[in-house]
Amino acid sequence: MDISPLQKLRYEYQPKLPSILREDIRTILPIEGAETSPAHDKEAIKALFPNTCGLPAISFAKGKNKKISDRRNVGVILSGGQAPGGHNVISGLFDALKAANPGNQLLGFKGGPSGILEDSYILIDKEFLAPFRNTGGFDIIGSGRTKLETEEQFEICAKVCKQHDVSALVIIGGDDSNTNAAVLAEYFKQHDHGIQVIGCPKTIDGDLKNESIEISFGFDTATKTYSELIGNIERDANSAKKYWHFIKLMGRSASHIALECALETQPNICLISEEVEANKQSLTSIVNYIADAVAARAEDGNNFGVVLIPEGLVEFIPEIKYLIEEINNLLAKDIVAFSACNDSSERITFVSERLSQASRNVFSILPSDIKKQLLMDRDPHGNVQVSRIETDKLLASMVDARLKKMKSEGTYSGKFSTMTHFFGYEGRCAFPTNFDADYCYSLGYNAFMLIGGDLTGYISSVTNLSLPADKWQAGGIPITMMMNLEQRHGSMKPVIKKALVELDGAPFKYFAEHRQKWARETCFVYPGAVQYFGPTQVCDQTTRTLALEQAAK
């Protein structure tokens, strides 16, 4: 198979580990720290997880560890959307497993959690793994979104594991996947199945984070990939001087990606969904805010600029959120009559006539294409597929209409032409940065250390990430520590709490202090392509978000 020179060099890259994990694996001991507890709904979580809630935090220190050399088979699952670095989690897990005992085996369950339910797996050996080291994607074993959440599924998992003598499962995924890992670990413990479950924190969106999970893997690579593209567009905008670029970025529930990209590239405007919700901003007020910035730059002769928009923005605008809820409820109740409509025009009229007056007013100001997108096929839960709503085009269109009105009133005399973009899939399978290659390898290696410590219900944790890798701290925390109760499908369910952008956090404060200047002046920063070889300050730098957070501690 032909490969690029970069691929060949990346296969040969040896990821860096925290100092403690560089020791002989038989001389690393798990050390119990203080007892942990959930930050929210403590009593309820404890009642649901009596065997895995309240366990101590784990760190590692030097000492004899005879038990880690015991013969083991371990299973691994990739769950959810792709994120750069997943292959390195598996690589780190494999290398630690073989260092402990060359007879150990790693089974990769194919296609996500469904792989274990269907007993579909591949035995991962050195030769099979070699072409996947330090590469992007999840193509080594594939991924999927099947949830492991019923007792019937848990028993199938136990049966398949015992059939292959698998004594531990590593589930690599986001908040939902690690919630499922916690539930599975509790079930196995409760029923004495003797199967450990360890999680690894993955999500490009960056919303799986806390003091022990400083960053979820893939976020660094994705934001650097998007920031390169944004920087390229900024350079083009500053060259052509005739377009306003509206760029939608991945981030359904949180605006971490948009904020990080703004910190890296200094666009004229970046919207933060969490701030929009906190300030109860209307769609009209957002449009006016952008239009006023466009007009101000036009006064200086700058009829160009860049606007960053988080993917999930529309769900954070109160009036749009209520509109979406009404549409979801309406279509759930009247789906037969709605489906009988002959075309999009009839469907729009059907819905508009049945909305409350407030929601009808909002619906009426939306461009026709956005109305159609709100009425497209629902997701499996019957909800609007928000990621399909072209928020970039919505805002560009509405700002254009606002500026035309301002021009007729004599308050604007500039030129306004737009280009729209959505950056999502471009970052999900990119070659991992050195940071993500190192971090993910450490997470996988560390996951086996937790297995070797006979632990279950833990998530692999590597901290101090703004420092060089040899100063990183390895350990683990109980997944239950991150959980709370939330309303899901009509009942309260234990889930990992999503981490949204903190408006009193150092990254947002820095952004807020500078955005007025960025809005009026051309302060663009051009990050350029991800660098793999060269000075560490260029190749191994972490995100601006993490650097600001840790500097503030």
Image: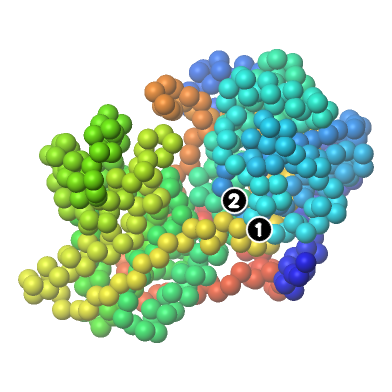
Residue 306 in sight: yes
Instruction: Identify whether 111 is placed above or below 48.
Output: below
User: Which residue is at the front of the view, 281 or 514?
Assistant: 281
- Name the residue located 17 percent from the left edge and 65 percent from the top edge: 402
Left or right, 484 with respect to 462, comes to left
Residue at (47, 73) in percent of width and height: 231
Q: Would residue 550 be visible to someone looking at this image?
A: no
Contact, mark 1 vs mark 2 (Cβ under 8 Å)? yes
Q: Position of residue 184 (x, y in %)?
A: 64, 25
Q: Position of residue 188 (x, y in %)?
A: 70, 21
Residue at the far left in the pictured view: 409
| Vertical placement of residue 277 versus 294, above or below | above
Identity of the residue drawn at 60% across and 52% down: 83
Tell me the number on the disc at residue 82. 2
* Disc 1: which residue: 136
Measure the alpha-carbon separation of dots 1 and 2.
Answer: 9 Å
